[in-house]
Image (cartoon, helix red, strand yellow):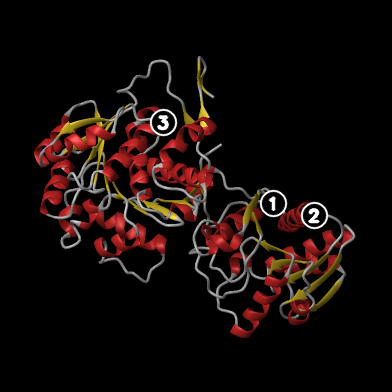
Amino acid sequence: MSMFHPLLTASQMRQLEQDRFRAGQSSLAAMEAAGRAVADEVLKRWSGQGQAVVLAGPGNNGGDGYVVARHLAEAGWSVLVGAWGDPNELRGDARTMRQRYGGEVVPLREGLDRVLHETVVVDALFGIGFARPVEDGLAARIRAACEQAGLVVAVDVPSGVDADSGRVVSDMVWADVTVTFGARKPAHALEPAHSRCGDVILVPIDLSPSADEVAHYGVTCQMVGTPRLPRPGPQDHKYSRGHVWVASGGPSSTGAARLAARAALRIGAGVVSIASPPSAVAINAAHVTAVMVKRAAGAEELAACLADERSSGMLIGPGFGIGERCRQAVLALLATGKPLVLDADALTSFEADPDALFQAIQGPVIMTPHEGEFRRLFAMVDASAGKLERVRAAARISGGIVLLKGPDTIVGTPDGQIYINCHATPELGTAGAGDVLAGTILGLIGQQRQLGLGAAEAAAVAAWLHGEAGRRIGPGLIAEDLPEAYPDILKAVAVRFTRRGVR
């Protein structure tokens, strides 16, 4: 089972459906399967016979809604459909499903007025076909009805959000659960739409894209799912698992480097060393045990740390200090061609001259800005564009991998690939959590040979593991807690080596 799930845009999903239907697959059977899946989810989540108001739109999403209504009515529920527009004007499969339903159908506004506290609302208004804003008064009535309902189930995506960008076009539906078909859409992973989806249930209905179709339709966006990471094999040793370095700041700002180093070690790197300025060697050495400390006075000595053939990569930035010293160190490290993670001060030091950084990138480089750092370093990128477009542009311009931190962390590559991680928690909004994430990325990069992950994939998986640690710890979380959650998480996601290979 893949740890990365393709996210299809609305047009890619429509093309897939059209191609499948032209090849002989029944579109009517697909609509029946979709509506039945939504009805089954309602019945699973609501005990006993209930009351449902199905909000049915003027297209195929509305057709799904009529299937839901029929199945709920057959299960003994009290059901009515609130129709957007004249249901007699429906065409194709949606018209057929309207005729098969045969139950009560009222105008949309009347259906909204009949939503009570114990009503289940099924949002089958627009799905991925939503494009134009809804008049504010009607949008407010839909929102009020959904807020009053006992359960809200959205078909494909909650109405009001753009399926491709996750942008809220009209503030209407906050769902408790969203049932989608064939493949997830970007809105299921991107904020603010992600928060409006509730639990996302993917139902194949014989429309799941194959690997060949993913390539054929040009799908470049993937969501990070639960990883499956191999445990070390019998021939592994500490250096085969990676020797990674973290560059430390001066004596008053060493904590960030130690947080990152601890994370890299806990996530499985075989050897982790802190490259410390002479003035901070004693304080770093006094606070670490398994992490080693080496004196590195300046750019040349930092680069020499990476010159060792056993060195797998370095993180620089957290607590390092902003300015010319940092710029020279980053440029010297980039010249080695070894993998680098650039965070915090390593990014801020180039805000006035980002081209100097971008032109020096030649090996695998992962930049990990938060929104403020991103806007300052990538001031040339249109700030009004969507997050996916901004990250894609930044990666293309810089030639590096860009990880934009947030509730939906986005990883972009220079060739346009995107990974989205929405597996996180607001408790991660605490000092030092970003340093832990940077160290986690570094630790996975050190294990690339063992794990079989590219640099961008390692960054994306690190974001998931970091988010899982935050979820497990919960309220009261501080950054020091995060690496200590990694061993149990790694046990949960591990696959093991056998004589026949990995399992």
In the image, 333 versus 73, the foreground residue is: 333
The residue type indicated by label 2 comes to: Leu
**Which labelled disc corresponds to residue 43?**
2
The picture quadrant where one finds residue 287 is top left
Q: Does residue 214 show up?
A: yes
Q: Please give the name of the residue rendered at 18% of the width and 51% of the height, measured from the top-left corner.
A: 321
Image quarter of the C terminus: top right
**Residue 250, how many percent across, how many down?**
17, 45
- Of the numbered discs 3 and 1, the one sitting upstream in the chain is 1
Kindly report the distance in space between the C-alpha atoms of the residues bearing marks 2 and 1. Answer: 28 Å
> Would you call the spot at circle 1 few (<14 residues within 10 Å), some (14-19), or many (20 or more)?
some
Query: Badges 2 and 1: C-beta atoms under 8 Å apart?
Result: no
Tell me the residue that label 3 is attached to. Answer: 451
In the image, 38 versus 227, the foreground residue is: 227
**Which labelled disc corresponds to residue 25?**
1
Task: Label 2, secondary structure: give it.
Answer: helix
